[in-house]
Amino acid sequence: MASLLSAPNLFALSLAPFLVFLWYAKRSQRFPPLAWWGFAATLVFVLVTVVAGGVAQLRFGRQLADVDPLHGGAEAFLTASNLLVALGFAKAGRQRPEAGKNPD
């Protein structure tokens, strides 16, 4: 049971619902495109984090959180993806017609 709950297994299992979410969001035709790209970019963050974690362990013998340049670089991808999500929803909110507002 412990091997099923290992970090790599939990990571792999967590990708499935996220990919389903991305598929559904894209298919719904109602999801803001820029926000969708932000969520998709989160997968780039995950990939960069995995690679940076490997480099931190192999090159420095430390975990990623202890190697500031690598950790900061990986987190920059998360910041960028979050920005895309926020901008996408902000843009969609501005473009949405105001319901119940009557012009005078």
Image (cartoon, rainbow, N blue to C red):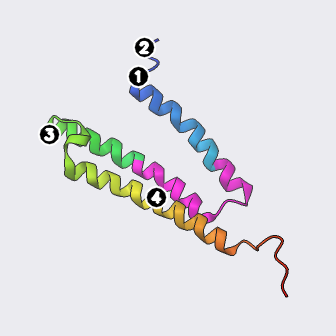
Inspect the magenta stretch and tell me whether residue 24 lies in it: yes
Q: Which mark is residue 6?
A: 1
The kind of residue on which mark 1 rests is Ser
Mark 4, Cα crowd under 10 Å, few <14 / some 14-19 / many 20+, is many
Q: Which mark is residue 75?
A: none
Of pointers 3 and 1, the one earlier in the residue sequence:
1
Disc 2 designates what residue?
Answer: 2
CB under 8 Å between callouts 1 and 4?
Answer: no
User: Residue 4: horizontal and vertical position, in percent?
Assistant: 46, 18
**CA distance for labels 4 and 2:** 33 Å
**CA distance for labels 3 and 4:** 27 Å
Inspect the magenta stretch and tell me whether residue 92 lies in it: no
CB under 8 Å between callouts 3 and 1?
Answer: no
Q: Is residue 44 above or below residue 104?
A: above
Disc 4 designates what residue?
Answer: 81
Residue drawn at 50 percent across, 63 percent down: 84
The kind of residue on which mark 4 rests is Ser
Residue, far bottom = 104
On the picture, is 84 further left or further right than 76? right
Q: For the residue labelled by badge 3, is the local secondary structure a helix, a strand or a loop?
A: helix
On the picture, is 26 further left or further right than 35? right
**CA distance for labels 1 and 4:** 27 Å
Of pointers 4 and 2, the one earlier in the residue sequence:
2
Disc 3 designates what residue?
Answer: 60
The kind of residue on which mark 2 rests is Ala
